[in-house]
Image (cartoon, rainbow, N blue to C red):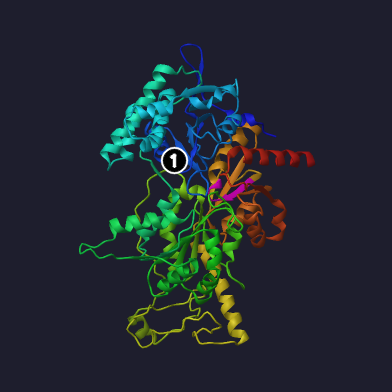
Amino acid sequence: MISDAIDLQEDISSTGDGTHRVLNDFSIQIATVNGSGSQSANSILLRSIFGMGIPVSGKNLFPSNIAGLPTWYTIRVSKDGWVARKAQNDLLIAMNAETAQEDVRTLRSGSAVIYDEGLKLNELRTDVTFYPVPFDKLAAETGADAKIRKLIKNMVYVGVAAQLLSIDIPTVEKAVRQQFAKKQKAADLNWKAVQLGFDYAANNLRKTDPFVVERMDETNGKIIIDGNSAAAMGAMFAGVTVVAWYPITPSSSVVEQLIGYMKKHRIEQDGKATFAIVQAEDELAAIGMTLGAGWAGARAMTASSGPGLSLMAEFAGLGYYAELPGVIFDIQRTGPSTGLPTRTSQADLSFIANISHGDTKHVLLLPGNVKECFDFGVQSFDLAEQLQTPIFVLSDLDIGMNNWMSEPFEYPTQPMQRGKVLSAEDLTRLGGFGRYADVDGDGIPYRTLPGTDHHAASYFTRGSGHNAKAQYSERPDDYENNMLRLSRKFETAATLVPKPVLEGTGKEKVGIIAFGSSHFAIIESRDELAREADIATDYLRVRAYPFTKEVHDFVASHDRVYVVEQNRDAQLQGLLKLDLDVAQLTKLRSVLHFNGLPMDALSVTQAISSMEISQGASR
């Protein structure tokens, strides 16, 4: 078993006075009350460290109510570029009296706490450094009225943290003024609060904890963005023209951001919009509008989460069987039922793969970072029209709503792939077509778009039994032939979807398979396994379903394969078992994480190392 010491690996260097410091390698937790206005302060703190060239990531942990309950925000600072959630935090900024004592008790020895002096948290422990701050007094010194002072307190802790961590103060000011770029008075007031906190810490607090930042050059050219914004941007660049949705956490910001992008970039000079975004009465109506618009030739989409997808099942089956293009973004959260609306999960995989009744198989794209949210946001629309079917893009709350460091996105240069669409000229040459006929042997039929000016362009779109000419049929052979063709189309999809990404030599005995946001914990865990337990691994990140040939080859070439995922029932492993040869199934082992928190590297490392030790003992 790998000990918890793995989580304590730090860059410790000596200072001039003989003490030690932990440089650019720690995690900050900020505990506040939901609705207290801390989001801006947290973003400024994150961007200030990022502005010093140091890799960072930021994660929200917030309740599903509007206001009043505890909320936490963590900032991972890592000179090595690790951005997964860290199992333990090193610096606590305690602004919530309700959770403060428990937050302090969960810290490991050697941590530090910035807290409101009235809470008297220093009486709880002797192995943690405490920094009391009179936040109310300092907020009052800004001159703001009482209502605003409740918000300004958050900016005070930014200043205190900046001084104690040695964050470059001009960089903090730049972040403040960027945050409030359109509100000069707000920028000045918030900057004043930061200065008051910074000066107080400099004059009244003696730093005795080891955590400090120092400028690096590891963020040059990079951006910070959340996955939902990236997905919305990708949809816009893909040429989406119709969006139908119903709000639900954590998917709402996909469409909310898209509305902003489209208003900025898709309004003609005469003021007319080149798009339609409609809030439907429910999720069933939203997917119905999406598939109807796709049938009409528009590039159309919706976005939702698990409960909404449950309502969409009927139309999803129609889209599959009638062969209607459309894109559905599923930003996963925990379930079943309402579950934990503001916690992350990867538990929709098996449900969406077969959503609807009968023999149904859907194409899924599985982005593993914000750049792929953008890239797959573009590619999903091409695939929907090429395959004439709903395409589901499965992100999750962790990727979708949290801040991630990323390479800039690449401007799409390839033309749209509209698939097998017959023009009037094509119909004149052919003399007609069978809407559901497999002309090319790939399972994908030809279609026409409504309004095509040709007498042979029309056809029936049927969700009931039909033959190759789209005529109603209950003949057993027609139904069987149609279902076999749809199966061939699914096989064709495996040649078009994004291929998995392999990391490692490809020659190790131990393999890891995962998808989505699990990636960040796994790449860090692989480093830990090699360094601490001498376990070398290969890693295959699956990016789509149906699985490609590379997935089969990966399992076949390894003795043991750990399938890491964020759900209780090993859903990815379940789909693999349906796909692989029987002889390969004994190689699969599950590493599961399903408590609603983003996956951390240490838990993966401990699970795999424990099973590897047991494997050695059994041999």
Q: Position of residue 104 (x, y in %)?
A: 57, 29
Work out whether residue 169 or residue 196 is closer to the camera in this orientation and state it.
Answer: 196
Q: Name which residue lies at 35% across and 79% down.
A: 423
Query: In the image as oriented, which residue stretches furthest toward the left?
Result: 270
Write the start and end of the magenta stretch as one range. Answer: 511-518
Identify whether 6 is placed above or below 560: above
**Horizontal side, residue 536 vs residue 236: left or right:** right
Task: Depth check: give the residue in front, 590 or 255.
Answer: 255
The residue indicated by pointer 1 is 36
Query: Residue 516 lies in magenta, yes or no?
Result: yes
Residue 201 position, x and y percent, is 41, 21
- Looking at the rendered image, the quarter that the C terminus falls into is top right
Q: Magenta stretch containing residue 114, yes or no?
A: no
Q: Residue at x 37, y 79 (%)?
A: 450
Query: Where, quadrant-wise, is the N terminus in this rendering?
Result: top right
Amino acid type at image mark 1:
Ser
Classify mark 1: helix, strand or loop. loop
